[in-house]
Image (cartoon, rainbow, N blue to C red):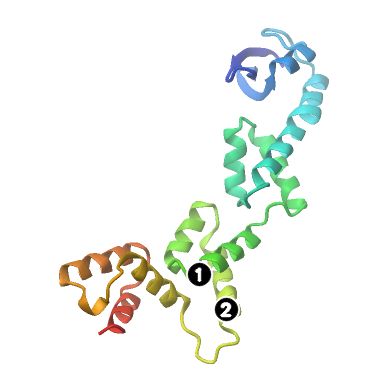
Amino acid sequence: MVITRLEEVEKSKVNIYIDGIVRFQLYKKEIENYSILEGIELSPFVYHEILENTIFPRAKQKALAILKFMDRTEQELRMKLKDAGFSEDIIERALIYMKEYDYINDDRYTSHYIRNNVSRKSKLMMQSELYQKGIKKETFLEHYQEELSLLTENEEEPEEPEIIALRKAVSKKYKGELTQIPKEEKQKLMSYLFRKGFTMDHIRKVFSENI
């Protein structure tokens, strides 16, 4: 393994290229400690030592710092670690560690997300937003039904959360009485709600309540 390039990416951080590929980032002080120089041969022992004693612990520490104030999906954490300059193999190891200790759990994240948004957003909007976070459609639908059952289990005639969310979206966008809304403004509002993922059947139902 030959150190082919040292590339400064920040004032104190440097990308270490080995055989033409970026393998990890080190601080300048660490480069001195490990005697890293362009063109020298890096022994497998030192390479392993750098990964195990410096890079992997740093990746875990970074992941924990990211999760400290906000829960993340596996995909979100992966992207954050990638942006921080960690290699794919180190990221995978860090993610395995986080999952083993339940620091990240996509099922838990999905349930919490649905619970917090079911009365504010359309089903389609939630599904779309979670998909962008790496949650598969099947996972969303499974947890959506579970949360829906929990939400309505004590109600004799439960109202659809989608309708509740739709009413909130309407009142947030239009402050007046829907019975008084001009036709052109009504069409614009209905189009807006449709773009937010609400079905036209639900939209018509909410508008008909005010006629």
Residue at 68 percent across and 7 percent down: it is 39
Q: Amino acid at mark 2?
A: Leu
Q: Earlier in the sequence, mark 2 or mark 1?
A: 1
Residue at 43 percent across and 76 percent down: it is 164
Q: Amino acid at mark 1?
A: Val
Instruction: Please provide percent x and percent y for residue 64.
Output: 71, 43
Q: Mark 1 highlights which residue?
A: 118
Instruction: Please provide percent x and percent y for residue 3.
Output: 68, 13
Quarter of the rendering containing residue 168: bottom left
* Horizontal relation, residue 190 to residue 140: left or right: left
Q: Quadrant of the N terminus?
A: top right
175 relative to 36, above or below: below
User: Residue lying farthest bottom?
Assistant: 156
Q: Quadrant of the C terminus?
A: bottom left
For the residues labelled 2 and 1, the Cα–Cα distance comes to 10 Å
Callout 2 crowding tier (Cα within 10 Å): few <14, some 14–19, many ≥20 = some
166 vs 175, nearest the viewer? 175
Residue at 64 percent across and 12 percent down: it is 4
Disc 1 element = loop
Whether label 2 touches label 1, CB < 8 Å:
yes
| Residue 151, numbered label | 2
Residue at 62 percent across and 13 percent down: it is 5
162 vs 50, nearest the viewer? 162
200 relative to 39, above or below: below
* Horizontal relation, residue 61 to residue 173: left or right: right
Disc 2 element = helix
Instruction: Please provide percent x and percent y for residue 175.
Output: 31, 69
Q: How many marks?
A: 2
75 relative to 150, above or below: above
| Residue 165, numbered label | none
Instruction: Please provide percent x and percent y for residue 8.
Output: 59, 16
Callout 1 crowding tier (Cα within 10 Å): few <14, some 14–19, many ≥20 = many
